[in-house]
Image (spheres, grey):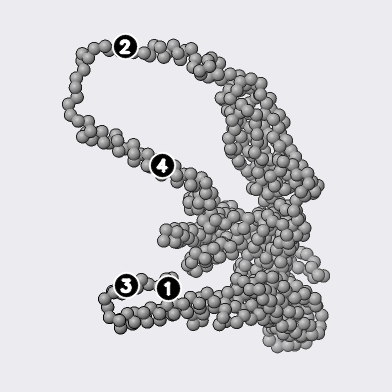
Amino acid sequence: MRYFSNVPAVDAKVSGRRKIETRSYLMIGFAATLAAVLFVLFPDVSIAQTFTATVNHTTVGQNEQFEVSFTFSATDVNGIKNFQAPGFQDFVLLSGPDQSTSLQFINGAASGSMTYSYYLRCPKIGKFTIGAASLEYNGKKYTTKPVTIDVTKASPKPAAGTKGAPTVSSNNIGDNVFILASADREKVYLGQPVTVTYKLYTRLPIASQMQVSKLPSYEGFWAEDLTLPGTISLTTETYHGKPYSVGVLKKVELFPTQTGRLSVTPMVLDIPVQVRQRQGGSPNNVFDQFFNDPFFNSYSTVNLKSTSNTIKVDVVPLPSNNVPKSFTGSVGDFTMSSQISNVNTKADEPLTLKITISGQGNIQLLTMPDISLPSGFDTYQPKITQQITRDNAVSGTKTFEYLIVPRVAGRQEIPPIKFSYFNPARRSYITLATPPYPLDIAPGANNGNQNVAGFSKENIKLLGEDIRYIHTTTSGLRREVGYTIFSAWFWSAVVAPLFILIGLVTWKRRTDKLAGNVQLLRYRQAEKVARARFKKAKLLMDGGKQAEFYAEISQAIFGYLEDKLHIPKSEMSLERAESVLKARNIDGRLLASLRSCTEKCEFARFAPAGDGAAAMSDMYNELTSVIVGLERTLSVKKHA
């Protein structure tokens, strides 16, 4: 926005009155503009900050779930830091904090709020106090007032003779249907995997397909989803003395990429729960007993928003003593093998050295140290292939194929190539090495008959035969008529190389720019890579392979967002992508379609559609439209 416009210069010969009027207008305009700028830069002057604590119920039953929220309101909530929740000593923390932000404009004034929500239950009866929460905002500390909760006995179940259907609340259902997240480790080394499992515990029937309200985010982790069956298989488990039907919803292996205390945010699902309601009547009445038979029971569906608990993981750095020089950050349990294509070769003839690393760990982030060969060898960047399985843990193999060209004949040797990794089970670094490869290198085609100048005798002989007889007279020569400078072919020969040179220089600069800017290269190729994945997904869809189709199309959309928005894989999440797209003013309907598609794709395996082909076709067409819309919008905004 521009606050000043170009004011025409006042002519030196105008009257004094007109000069005074012009100066007055300029002063009025400058004052109005200054006031607008001050309002934009310092809105906090007119809008106060508030920090309050609220609960959805001040009176709750024993062990009934309730929500407490701490909300800070201001014009700009980006300055919030060091939020401290109360201790919740008398309560059981079910999940939290769930963080949400809102922004609104009223009469041209902006205001926002940040809310931290917790779900609690109280196992005791009486009046209990939730202490004060605190935070810092622009260097000033704010605290909430304590909140009192009255915990009473849980409501008794209606007697058999009570008329009408029983009243069912979401709090009561929450004790019988909930999501529980668990981690196999609470303290790990940097790079050591943590397996997080999300399970559904239920004592009530589920009416239809569950809907995702919020996916968990893995800030500070590299995430690998583990393979699960196409449908949820229920087993029976006892939790807090009660039997539940339990099904695994999601299983993910997380590789921490930073140290400290990291959090995995909750997953939120909308679960349609069926609640059976019995008919009223007297237990002594035979007619009422007949119609109270389960065959005549009616059911109602209650939509439950279930939130899993938050997972906390302490990540400690790797030991700093006795670190091998060949260590590149790999953590896990690996083995190494190698093979060479030929040990008897000739100079200038290439040979191939393959190094294969297998085991459990983050295979995708595994790298080899730079190999150093003795003088007399040329080596090139390796060709890398990998095969990864994601069953109960991430494992697989990664192969590095090096092309090596010997330049000197004789007896040579490729020394052992070392690879080091950290084994968390042994708490030590382990170094693996290939065997040495002795080579017998025979002279090549151009190595055996060279003199000091680099020319062979045969070449000198041919050069002598190539000398032609030089004419000593001018007979047979004639003078060319005309001026060469005015001919078309002359100017074509002069100008054409200039244009060719300009084109080559432009192409070379563009190539160097792309090669030196990985983000720009990924941005340019994002749409091309996504198109290739969609072609592969189309083949899987035509073959009726639902699991492979959804996996491929999910990788297509997330890979496109990573490359197009310059988001590293370790930081990629749907919330992060949405925030970047919102900052670029992408249409809200397009963002809603993106979220809907990714959530449907992520949880398609929970309850596969009856008509799998139709569901895959709809998903394919919808995601295609989303990527086309994003590509068109981002391209227009980039060149705007």
Please state which of the two labelled residues, at mark 2 or mark 1, is closer to the viewer.
1
**Regarding mark 1 in the picture, which secondary structure is present there?**
loop
Mark 2 vs mark 1: which is more N-terminal? 1
Image point (33%, 13%), residue name? 468
| Rendered location of residue 504, percent (x, y) | 40, 40
Q: Is mark 4 in CB contact (under 8 Å) with mark 2?
A: no
Q: Badge 2: how crowded within 10 Å, few (<14), some, or many (20+)?
A: few
Q: Mark 1 — residue? A: 3
- Give the residue at the far left of this rendering: 481
Please state which of the two labelled residues, at mark 1 or mark 4, is closer to the viewer.
1
Q: Is mark 2 in CB contact (under 8 Å) with mark 1?
A: no
The amino acid marked with disc number 2 is: Tyr
The amino acid marked with disc number 1 is: Tyr
| Rendered location of residue 337, percent (x, y) | 70, 36
Looking at the rendering, which quadrant does residue 571 occupy?
A: bottom right
Q: Mark 2 — residue? A: 469
